[in-house]
């Protein structure tokens, strides 16, 4: 008698297995909610990072354009120069500008790499978020099946 099986809907609702499933289902849903919050925060951070990288990249483009213009002006001045001191000065200036231009191009390449990675990370975060949103829509029965 003590171990007799209860029958009917009330037995299902009050059974220890069902209570355990309900707690587990609540935990799964809570985990999904936290995952969604984390992924939303990650997406927001990545979007901000992309904006900052884009601003930096634009600064490098502007600096590179300025450097190229300075280099062109120095090369034109060198063609017109006749004074040995001025020629030496302009050659040194041109060398320094070439080095600066090369460094700016290298920095821009690194920024572009960072930008591409941030975009890939954002795309993945959005995909993960969509999957988590889909899991949030699971019915309790689907949660039990997934457990």
Image: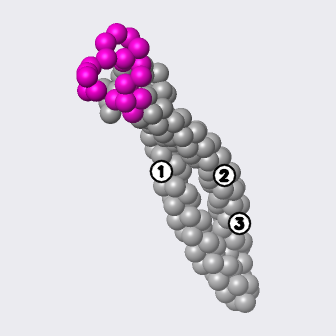
Left or right, 66 with reference to 119: right
Instruction: Specify the segment rendered in magenta.
Output: 1-20
Question: Which is nearer the eye, 81 or 31?
Answer: 31
Figure quadrant of the N terminus: top left
Q: Residue at x 66, y 52 (%)?
A: 52
Mark earlier in primary sequence (3, 2): 2
Labelled pair 2, 1 in contact (Cβ < 8 Å)? no
Q: Indicate the secondary structure of the residue bearing disc 1.
A: helix
Mark 2, Cα crowd under 10 Å, few <14 / some 14-19 / many 20+, is few
Q: CA distance from mark 3 to mark 2?
A: 27 Å
Q: CA distance from mark 2 to mark 1?
A: 14 Å
Q: Residue at x 63, y 78 (%)?
A: 96
Q: Position of residue 120 (x, y in %)?
A: 46, 44
Q: Residue at x 62, y 72 (%)?
A: 100
Q: Is residue 17 magenta?
A: yes
- Residue tagged 3: 70
> From this viewpoint, which residue is outermost toward the bottom?
85
Mark 1, Cα crowd under 10 Å, few <14 / some 14-19 / many 20+, is some
Q: Position of residue 75 (x, y in %)?
A: 65, 70
- Residue tagged 1: 117
- Residue tagged 2: 52
């Amino acid at each position: 008698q003590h171990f007799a099986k209860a029958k009917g809907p009330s037995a299902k609702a009050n059974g220890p297995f069902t209570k355990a499933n309900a707690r587990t289902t609540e935990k799964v849903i809570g985990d999904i909610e936290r995952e969604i919050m984390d992924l939303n925060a990650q997406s927001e951070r990545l979007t901000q990072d992309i904006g900052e990288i884009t601003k930096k990249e634009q600064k490098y483009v502007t600096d590179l354009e300025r450097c190229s213009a300075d280099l062109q002006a120095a090369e034109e001045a060198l063609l017109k120069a006749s004074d040995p001191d001025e020629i030496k000065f302009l050659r040194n200036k041109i060398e320094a500008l070439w080095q600066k231009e090369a460094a700016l191009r290298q920095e821009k390449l690194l920024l572009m790499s960072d930008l591409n990675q941030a975009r890939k990370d954002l795309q993945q975060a959005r995909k993960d978020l969509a999957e988590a949103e889909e899991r949030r829509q699971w019915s309790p029965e689907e949660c039990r099946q997934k457990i």
